[in-house]
Structure formats: structure tokens, C-alpha cells
Image: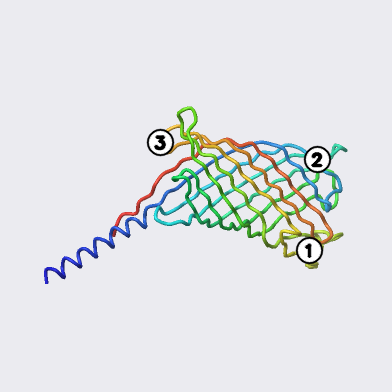
């Protein structure tokens, strides 16, 4: 009887230990801001190319349980740009992108190299406003994409400080976007309800995109790092006989925090 009780106690102890381990999460939180060049083309508004400067705010949260190889990543990216054409016309562009993904991790080189692969869901909402247009001065930008994603990170020491170089690449696979048709006004769409293929399925052929993020972290204190980097987001689409692209290049700086969350055993 005592032996059976000991077995039950051992099983209960192992279950409690497993429960505690399952609650151990490592969280990496990054907040960055940056500035850089923007290039816009939207043939619904104008055949001209617009070039200018924009700013970006990027917030990233990555969560991973220590005993598991899968991690969850969430990214919030907000942009605003003011661009000019060769004829002194102006366009104002603003967009919000939300990325949510799951990535599988592999560790190499005694833990110094980490590779991750998976996919992210990208939801985007934005607008392009042309200050010179009387009719249809604005173009809405809405799309939903599935994006295969890869990440490589390498840890090293430089000048006595722990450093981490990280590169993230995301490419589109398939999705859906909103677009008026060629010659169709927003009045026809929303006031008269005239649908004309305005919800358009997209692929990497009709809406190619290349989003790459390169960062370097330098340790300041335990769990706190300064992060500098480059974000290039090349978004393009050719649907409904209309062409659009928004190319942004940003040089970023911010802070990264890394900490653990432990769930107490029940």
C-alpha cells in the first residue's frame, strides 16, 4: 500500500513539474521607429511615379515555450509617407500591417545559430491620397495574405558585448485584395452597389511582395538590448487592369527586451 502511495506521489510530482515547465515562456519584445525613402505608383490615381520620405513604427512580440520548437510571432507595422511627382503633385500614403505567424525552430553551432521557418498571416489596411485629383482623389488599400516566412539569427561577441544579428524574410503565397476596376468610381461601388470584381484573389504572380527585416542587437543590461536595423517592404499588385506599388525603405532604431514568464503549478 505504501509503495502504491509513493508511486502516486511520484506521478503527481512529475505532473506538477511538467505543468510548471509547460508554463515557462520566453518573450522577446521589440519597439522600433525609423525613417527612409518611399516610392509610390497607383495608376487608378495617376500614371506618375511619386517619391518621398516616410516614417515607420514597428512593434514585435515573439513568444516561445522553452521545451517546444514552435514559436508565435506578432508584428504591428504602421507607415506614413509624403511623396512628390516630377510635376510637383503630391500623394500622401498611410498603412497599417498586422502580421501573425507560427515558426519552427532549429538550433545549430552550439546554440549560436538559430533558424526558423513557417508562415505568417498578413492583414493590411491603408490609403493613398492624391492632392491634385478632383474626382476619386483617394485609393483604399486592403489585402489579406498568407506569407511563407524564414528567420536566421546568429549570436556573437563584439567589443566585450553580446550581439545578435537577425534576418527575417517573408514572401506572399496567396491572398485576397480589394480593388476598383478600371474606370470604376468609388461612388459606383459604395453608393450604387455596383460590384465589378472588387474582391480579387491574388497570388505571388499578381501581387508579388518582398518584406525583409535585418537587425542587430547590442546588449545594454540583463534582458535589455538596443536594436538597429533596416526594413524593406516591397508591395506590388496588378489586378483589374490597374497597377500599384508601394516600396518603403526604413532605417530603424529601438529597444528590445527579453524576459521569462513562469506559470505557477496548480
Q: What label does residue 99 carry, if any?
A: none
Q: Nearer the viewer, residue 161 or 125?
A: 161
Answer few, some or many: residues within 10 Å of disc 3's Cα (few below 14, many 20 plus, some between 14 and 19): few
Residue drawn where x is 61% and y is 37% of the image: 252
Q: Position of residue 266 (x, y in %)?
A: 28, 60
* Element at label 2: strand
Q: CA distance from mark 3 to mark 1?
A: 55 Å
Return the residue found at the far left: 2
Residue at mark 1: 189
- Residue 129 vs 207, above or below: the answer is above
Q: Position of residue 220 (x, y in %)?
A: 45, 32
Residue at mark 2: 90
* Element at label 1: helix
Q: CA distance from mark 2 to mark 1?
A: 25 Å
- Residue 151 vs 221, above or below: the answer is below
Q: CA distance from mark 2 to mark 3?
A: 46 Å
Q: Is residue 180 left or right of residue 99?
A: right
Q: Nearer the viewer, residue 201 or 198?
A: 201
Q: Quadrant of the N terminus?
A: bottom left
Pointer 2 with pointer 3, Cβ within 8 A: no
Name the front one of labels 2 and 1.
Answer: 2
Residue at mark 3: 222
Pointer 3 with pointer 1, Cβ within 8 A: no
Answer few, some or many: residues within 10 Å of disc 2's Cα (few below 14, many 20 plus, some between 14 and 19): some
Mark 2 or mark 1: name the one nearer the start of the chain: 2
Residue drawn where x is 64% and y is 49% of the image: 96
- Residue 116 vs 32, above or below: the answer is below
Mark 3 or mark 1: name the one nearer the start of the chain: 1
Amino acid at each position: 500500500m505504501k509503495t502504491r502511495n509513493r508511486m502516486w506521489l511520484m506521478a503527481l510530482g512529475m505532473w506538477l513539474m511538467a505543468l510548471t515547465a509547460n508554463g515557462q515562456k520566453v518573450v522577446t519584445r521589440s519597439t522600433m521607429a525609423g525613417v527612409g525613402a518611399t516610392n509610390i505608383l497607383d495608376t487608378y490615381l495617376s500614371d506618375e511615379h511619386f517619391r518621398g520620405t516616410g516614417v515607420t513604427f514597428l512593434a514585435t512580440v515573439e513568444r516561445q515555450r522553452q521545451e517546444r520548437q514552435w514559436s508565435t510571432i506578432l508584428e504591428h507595422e504602421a507607415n506614413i509617407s509624403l511623396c512628390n511627382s516630377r510635376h510637383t503633385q503630391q500623394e500622401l500614403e498611410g498603412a497599417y500591417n498586422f502580421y501573425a505567424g507560427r515558426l519552427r525552430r532549429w538550433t545549430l553551432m552550439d546554440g549560436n545559430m538559430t533558424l526558423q521557418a513557417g508562415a505568417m498571416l498578413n492583414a493590411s489596411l491603408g490609403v493613398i491620397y492624391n492632392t491634385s485629383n478632383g474626382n476619386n482623389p483617394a485609393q483604399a488599400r486592403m489585402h489579406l495574405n498568407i506569407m511563407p516566412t524564414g528567420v536566421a539569427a546568429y549570436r556573437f561577441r563584439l567589443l566585450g558585448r553580446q550581439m545578435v544579428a537577425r534576418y527575417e524574410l517573408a514572401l506572399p503565397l496567396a491572398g485576397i485584395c480589394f480593388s476598383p476596376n478600371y474606370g470604376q468610381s468609388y461612388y459606383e461601388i459604395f453608393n450604387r452597389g455596383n460590384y465589378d470584381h472588387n474582391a480579387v484573389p491574388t497570388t505571388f504572380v499578381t501581387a508579388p511582395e518582398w518584406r525583409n527585416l535585418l537587425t542587430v542587437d547590442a546588449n545594454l543590461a540583463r534582458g535589455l538590448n538596443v536594436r538597429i536595423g533596416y526594413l524593406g517592404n516591397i508591395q506590388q499588385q496588378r489586378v483589374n487592369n490597374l497597377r500599384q506599388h508601394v516600396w518603403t525603405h526604413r532605417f530603424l532604431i529601438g529597444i528590445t527586451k527579453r524576459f521569462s514568464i513562469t506559470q505557477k503549478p496548480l
